Amino acid sequence: VAVDENGTPLEDTNVQGEVQQKLDVVCNAIMLKQFCGSSKGVIAAVASEEEDVPRGCPDVMGDNAFAAGDYVAVFDPLDGSKNIEASLPVGTIFGIYKCQPGTKPTEETFLQRGNEMVAAGYCLYSATTILVLTMGSGVDGFTLDPDNSVFLHTHPDIRIPSSGPIYSFNEANFHDFSKPVQRYLDALKEGSSSIGVRSNARYVGALVADVHNVLINGGIYGYPGTRTNPQGKLRLLYESNPMAMIMEQAGGAASTGRGRILDVDPTAVHMRVPTFLGSIDNVYELDQFHQYYDDSAESIGGI
């Protein structure tokens, strides 16, 4: 249970209607200050998954000297926070977009397609702390050396295998998935998919941890739409787009099941999309299942 400094349980919810753990609030404040305060003249505005609307850096820092900047940042400060009490992995996700020259950032500035991002990355907090980063020319990984407080370049030019045996879905929702997704998962478990082997289920419940496992070992991560949440639960700006850029830059693919994630036109800063990330052969086959087995009467998501 999240508590305040006096031990009183916290029941605050974020804009998504989710109960905020105390560490969510702390991480959000740190990320806001770091993006705005550590990059004077670079980042002009920020949008957090934990807040209702984007904020200009002068508002974050309380100083108009931080108004200048050619970029805006989007981020999920603490992905998988429900894992905290069980000491399971959590992470941070971020993406960077360029502003139009000579303009002041507004909410519209953040509503850019993912293919307009100039950088994206995530930090995985687990047995080690790993930073995975792309600036549009490949993907590199860095591991924190806690003794010297520096990140070491431990994973140069990360490339995801073209196919892999891991699938990472929350199968508790299996009967609420669309028919194409159900058929695809059945094929993975039966060994009748194009990868030719029975796949292994791996699901931690934190996007960063599950995607990192797929990135290193190959396979597919999925958070499809369900009957109660037809667009899924992942936010396009803060989660799906940054992870999609990383996957594509590592030689993988990222899809809504009906198209490339990075080509989706955002209509709101907290817009959600069905999300499939992973090896190019696995994701392509998932898309083919949507094409050949979809039934408009049972379709979920529509993106």
Image (cartoon, rainbow, N blue to C red):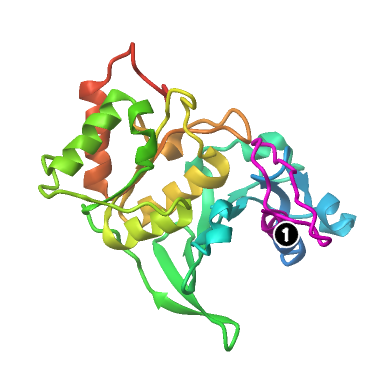
Residue at the far right in the pictured view:
63
User: Which of the two residues, 109 or 288, is positioned nearer the viewer here?
Assistant: 288
Pinpoint residue 55: horizontal percent, then vertical percent. Answer: 77, 45
Mark 1 neighbour class, 10 Å CA radius: few under 14, some 14 to 19, many 20 or more:
few
Pinpoint residue 26: horizontal percent, then vertical percent. Answer: 73, 59
Tell me: residue 211, above or below residue 105: below
Magenta-highlighted residues:
1-28
Main secondary-structure element of the magenta-colored stretch:
loop
Where, by quadrant of the figure, is residue 112 drawn? top right
Pinpoint residue 156: horizontal percent, then vertical percent. Answer: 37, 73
Determine the residue positioned at 53% across, 64% down: 87
Determine the residue positioned at 72% across, 43% down: 51
Q: Is residue 190 left or right of residue 239?
A: left
User: Which of the two residues, 252 or 213, is positioned nearer the viewer here?
Assistant: 213
Determine the residue positioned at 24% across, 58% down: 161
User: Which of the two residues, 137 or 19, is positioned nearer the viewer here?
Assistant: 19
Where, by quadrant of the figure, is residue 226 drawn? top left
Q: Quadrant of the C terminus?
A: top left
Q: Is residue 136 magenta?
A: no
Q: Which residue is mark 1?
A: 26
Determine the residue positioned at 53% across, 60% down: 86
Q: Is residue 220 left or right of residue 45?
A: left
Q: Secondary structure at mark 1?
A: helix
Where, by quadrant of the figure, is residue 267 drawn? top right
Would residue 9 be visible to someone looking at this image? yes
Q: Is residue 295 left or right of residue 140?
A: left
Q: Is residue 22 magenta?
A: yes
Would residue 67 be visible to someone looking at this image? no
Amino acid tagged 1: Val
